[in-house]
Image (cartoon, grey):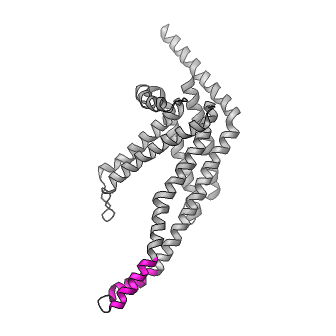
Amino acid sequence: KSRANCIIRGSGLISNMLTKTLKLFKEKFATLFILEALFIFLTFFFVIYVKNQVKIFLDLFNAYLPQIQQLQALIQESAENLVQLQQLIDTLAPLTIKMLILAYLITPLVLWILYSTSQSLIWKSLHKVKKYKYYLTSFFSFSFLALLFLYSILYFLWNKIDLSSFEFDNLLLLFPLAFLIAVYFSFVFHLIYKDNFKQSFKNTFILGIKNISSFILPFIFHLVILLFLIFSFLSLFLNYTIPQKWFISNYISLFMLFLAIILTILAKLYAYSSIKA
């Protein structure tokens, strides 16, 4: 009898959760779709811009490369060749610095701002947050800490990557593990956030570990959809950059991306409903 009651209670909870999810989907879909699509396509066009800037730099460098190699070979013969080589290096140095700043500072900064702004608006809509400025600051702070955590892991692993031999080091598995940890606790933070950042930050780790059984199923669904979204995004990007070599057409890539956006919305609504149920 008690087992039957548990099954009935469980069925009721699932039914209630699905009802809430569908209700939220009807109410919030237009707003959430616009915000998700804006984030995805602004990110896409920014990545294309970065890719074009890198290509311009590499084309310029390759144009100078034969001259640099020739001057390097002739340095022993004349001091004038050394002067010319130094002039070429001085010409390329500002462009190299510009590319390094674009790659290691501007790109992650812009992606962080785009992500934090769009996702804070999405979760603000779900949580019905009144103090948005404070929530935005809290969201930026948590996403910055998650990004800093991933950067720290990358910095630690950098010396472990041997590009000449491509030998695999087991420590490289730390990054996908760190990525999962960052995504999981970010996911928990978004779900449980209250008006107090310090309390929400603390509860993210306490509840994320203590109540992992409550979060794990929505998280797995969220993670699978996230991976599908990343794949769809890369598919569209590769269609734009190397269409002859990519096996998925542009139209299918676009369809996959829009489907991934819709599924992402459903995953968030399902997670929100399951925690609130």
**Left or right: 178 as drawn, with respect to 95:** left
Q: What stretch is highlighted in magenta?
A: 64-91
Q: Position of residue 270 (x, y in %)?
A: 58, 31
Q: Residue furthest bottom?
A: 77
Residue 63 at least partly seen = yes
Q: Quadrant of the C terminus?
A: top right
Q: Where is residue 87 in the image (x, y as percent from the top left)?
A: 42, 82
As drawn, 121 above or below 196? below
As drawn, 271 above or below 237? above
Q: Quadrant of residue 9?
A: top right
Q: Is the stretch drawn in magenta largely helix, strand or loop?
A: helix
Q: Where is residue 53 in the image (x, y as percent from the top left)?
A: 54, 67
As drawn, 77 above or below 212? below
Question: Was residue 81 drawn as part of the magenta stretch in this picture?
Answer: yes
Residue at position x 51%, y 58% from top?
106
Q: In which quarter of the image is residue 29?
A: top right
**Left or right: 249 as drawn, with respect to 72:** right
Residue at position x 44%, y 41% from top?
182
Question: Was residue 211 drawn as part of the magenta stretch in this picture?
Answer: no
Residue at position x 52%, y 15% from top?
7
**Total number of numbered discs in the rendering:** 0
Residue 248 at least partly seen = no
Q: Where is residue 275 in the image (x, y as percent from the top left)?
A: 54, 26
- Which one is nearer the viewer's eye here, 257 or 112? 112
Q: Which residue lies furthest to the top in this view?
A: 1
